[in-house]
Image: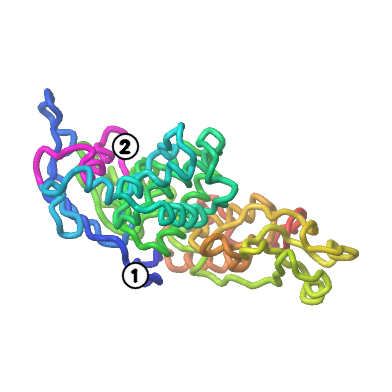
């Protein structure tokens, strides 16, 4: 089950958004692009708008910060009528992230992040501290990245900077318009995980637009399935939509893989995470070797996992800085069980390393743990098609050997 925002640690910093009979008709058109949308977006939740191209989901989202002015209706943000506020000040109080980050190419990373704080007339030291804090928050080293230009970044790095810029002034609301649509699938999965990790810490109100229903299931506390003119076909939790699609159109979004989608509802933090011996790179080799029974994880000076090692690697080594082998795909505590399964199978390992807040080591999840979780989910959904029929082996004879990475 998706963890409710109320059960997460930390205070809610987001605010409630209410759309009350909101419509948008463009000049010269008789048919509205958005017709009579009413919904409440709870404070501190991720609400995902999902629908086909042309359904008006981006138009609906942009009316929240008045990048597009509604023709009729009312929008309140934290109880305040958005139309009664100065439009520029409203936008400065709402974070906005789009595909490829939307970064200014002539500005450095630090300058991009500092745009809104400068408009708000923050002093230079406060801006510099905030830039460093946000780069750390999105997993980029300030010394290495602050003075680079967008062209010197990968797609994933650009997107991380785009999220950092959106969060720069600590807004209560974050609007995200298909932000991960232009990156490769592996990077997209990592960015999704990082967003969920940030949300656990920040508890913003996030409105996220996508056409990918799997992404909606993975990220959303609630999903609004939109049809033509942004008409709400169903607005509910991912679990409720998967279990009971409101109509044939919603069922078409869910597709035939509803049982497989259940793996996107359960998080790595919901299952047993095992511990392994760890050591920082500056610790003595002999101390680490004495604690290793099979294999262990080497951490950097910020407790982020960098390599795995075993007794054979440590034999004769004088330092932990260059010993061991790089870790393969990792997951976070916010990753789904689907992510964890793919990480394990991609590397042909019996386990995968798990990270927590700011990329710090959290433990290891094993294939046996995932199999137990899948069996439990299968028992909970006896009426659904078996998970094995969706392409998963729910009852393997034996676990593949860990030939090129850490085993159990």
63 falls in the magenta region: yes
Q: Which residue is drawn at 31% across and 37% down?
A: 52
Q: Can residue 215 be seen in this view?
A: yes
Separation of marks 2 and 1 at Cα, in angstroms: 34 Å
Q: Please name whichever residue, 408 or 376, is drawn nearer the observer in this view of the structure.
A: 408
Q: Please name whichever residue, 368 or 226, is drawn nearer the observer in this view of the structure.
A: 226
Classify 274 as above or below 193. Answer: below
In this view, the residue farthest toward the top is: 28
Q: Is mark 2 on a helix, strand or loop?
A: loop
Q: Please name whichever residue, 156 or 40, is drawn nearer the observer in this view of the structure.
A: 156
Instruction: List x then y, in percent, for residue 43.
Output: 27, 62
Q: Which residue is drawn at 64% across and 60% down?
A: 352
Q: Name the residue under label 1.
A: 11
The mark closer to the camera, 2 or 1, is 1
Classify 92 as above or below 344. Answer: above
In this view, the residue farthest toward the right is: 316
Give the mark nearer the N terminus: 2 vs 1: 1
């Amino acid at each position: 089950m998706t963890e409710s925002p109320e059960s997460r640690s930390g205070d809610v910093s987001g605010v409630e958004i209410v759309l009350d009979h909101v419509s948008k008709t463009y000049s010269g058109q008789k048919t509205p692009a958005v017709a009579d949308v009413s919904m409440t977006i709870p404070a501190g939740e991720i609400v995902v708008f999902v629908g086909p191209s042309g359904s008006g989901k981006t138009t609906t989202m942009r009316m929240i910060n008045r990048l597009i002015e509604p023709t009729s209706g009312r929008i309140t943000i934290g109880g305040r009528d958005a139309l009664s506020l100065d439009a520029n000040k409203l936008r400065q109080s709402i974070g906005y992230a789009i595909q490829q980050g939307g970064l200014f190419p002539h500005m450095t990373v630090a300058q991009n992040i500092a745009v809104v704080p400068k408009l708000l007339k923050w002093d230079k030291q406060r801006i510099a501290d905030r830039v460093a804090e946000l780069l750390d928050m999105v997993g980029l080293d300030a010394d290495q990245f602050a003075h680079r230009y967008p062209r010197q970044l990968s797609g994933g790095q650009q997107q991380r900077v785009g999220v950092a810029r959106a969060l720069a002034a600590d807004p209560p609301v974050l609007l995200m318009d298909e932000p991960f649509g232009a990156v490769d699938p592996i990077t997209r999965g990592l960015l999704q995980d990082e967003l969920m990790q940030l949300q656990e810490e920040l508890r913003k109100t996030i409105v996220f637009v996508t056409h990918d229903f799997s992404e909606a299931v993975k990220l959303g506390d609630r999903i609004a399935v939109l049809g033509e003119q942004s008409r709400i076909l169903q607005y509910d939790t991912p679990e409720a939509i998967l279990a009971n699609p409101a109509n044939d159109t919603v069922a078409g979004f869910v597709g035939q893989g509803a049982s497989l989608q259940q793996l996107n509802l359960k998080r790595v933090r919901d299952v047993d995470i095992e511990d392994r011996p760890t050591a920082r790179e500056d610790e003595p080799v002999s101390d680490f070797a004495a604690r290793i029974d099979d294999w262990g994880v080497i951490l950097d000076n910020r407790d982020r996992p960098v390599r795995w090692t075993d007794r054979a690697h440590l034999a004769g080594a004088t330092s932990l800085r260059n010993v061991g082998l790089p870790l393969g795909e990792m997951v976070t505590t916010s990753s789904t069980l689907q992510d964890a399964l793919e990480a394990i199978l991609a590397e042909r390992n019996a386990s995968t390393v798990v990270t927590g807040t700011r990329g710090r080591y959290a433990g290891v999840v094993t294939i046996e743990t995932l199999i137990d979780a899948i069996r439990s989910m299968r028992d909970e959904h006896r009426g659904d098609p078996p998970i094995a029929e969706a392409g998963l082996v729910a009852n393997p004879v034996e676990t593949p050997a860990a030939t090129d990475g850490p085993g159990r």
